[in-house]
Image: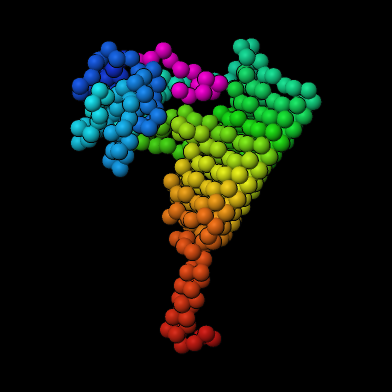
Amino acid sequence: MPDARFFESAPGLSLADIIEVTGAVLVDGNPGLKIETVAPLIHADERSVAFLADPKYRSALAATRAGAVFLTERHADLAPAGCARLVTPAPQAAWADIARRLHAVRQADHRGEARPAQLEDGVATGPGVVLGQGVSIGAGSRIGANTVIGPGVQIGRDCEIGANVSLGFCLIGDRVRIGASTVIGEAGFGVAGGASGLVDVPQLGRVILQDDVSVGANSCIDRGAWDDTVIGEGSKIDNLVQVGHNCRLGRHVILAGHTGLSGSVTIGDGAQLGGRAGVTDHVAIGKGARIAAASMVINDVPAGEVWGGQPARPMRRFLRETVWLAKQASRRQGGPDE
């Protein structure tokens, strides 16, 4: 279930209601079954509706405990016994529609009447700071001018939050430093094709910044689609860095400026990425690995290795190939001076 500090959950919908909303066709299910939440296949239980949009996740479908699942007619026979099948040509878009109805984002009421912000001793807030309901800020933390902190956000002690920062859907540890104009907790980039065009998929996770994390100015860290985006203890993120939804960084990771991580990237403890490095979705970078500046990582990187290039590969191989190409170009041109 999404965190109640950030999302308001509706009472639930019956499968009959879901059919009426989405136009899906119910196969082998009880129309009266009540669905209380949405979830991915691996997290779903009998109260949940999940979806299968990509057949590579058929093993997760076979093991799911979901009460119902959206899928195409082609994949309808893959659902396990006891799981109601909601057949639709656009499973993820249908799931997104139900997610919006069951889990609405808590809207900021900056009057703070329902759940006023709680500030411990020594908290300093600059001019123009806006605090949502239920915000908690630990002792000794300083909040820069014009920063906006959304409902339910928790900030630890002795943190330094710069000016014009936007914080939402996040839990922040102690001694965290966040540079000016950084945005943490915005929706990750989730899009599905529906009958009427592209549909934004609700992002129902959070961002967790552990103790002693540093995030530079003008960086963006997206909240998770369902699981959390996690930045591990002591990690250092430079200016102008993008961290996509569901990324998980270990402890003491370094991301230099202009690095971009796509969704669901995993980075092990002590790994380092040079400036302007890019990583495609669902890639794992091992503990202590190093990625050269301006590299594009499209495959998993083993622990302790140094990779570079576009696409990135082991550094020695990259350098050998670069030297070979230079020699070939020189020969074709008649020598190095031509």
The one of 15 and 217 positioned closer to us in this rendering: 15
| Range covered by the magenta-colored residues | 1-13
Q: Is residue 26 left or right of residue 215?
A: left
- In the image, is residue 336 above or below residue 48? below
> Does the segment drawn in magenta span residue 174?
no
Q: Residue at x 48, y 73 (%)?
A: 320
Looking at this rendering, what residue extends furthest in the right direction?
122
Q: Residue at x 44, y 80 (%)?
A: 328
Q: Nearer the viewer, residue 40 or 203?
A: 40
231 vs 175, left or right, is: left
Report the quarter where the N terminus lies: top left
Q: Looking at this view, is 208 or 143 the one in front?
A: 208
Q: Residue at x 50, y 51 (%)?
A: 285
Can you tell which quarter of the image residue 180 is in?
top right
Is 115 positioned to the left or the right of 145 in the image?
Answer: left
> Percent from the top left, x then y, of residue 93?
34, 31
Residue 303 versus residue 335 in the image, above or below: above
Q: How is the image coloured?
A: rainbow
Total numbered labels placed on residues in the image: 0
Q: Residue at x 47, y 28 (%)?
A: 204
State whether residue 186 appears in this view: no
Whether residue 265 is visible to the viewer of this picture, yes or no, is yes
Give the x, y percent position of residue 242.
Answer: 55, 45
Q: Which SS type dominates the magenta stretch?
A: loop
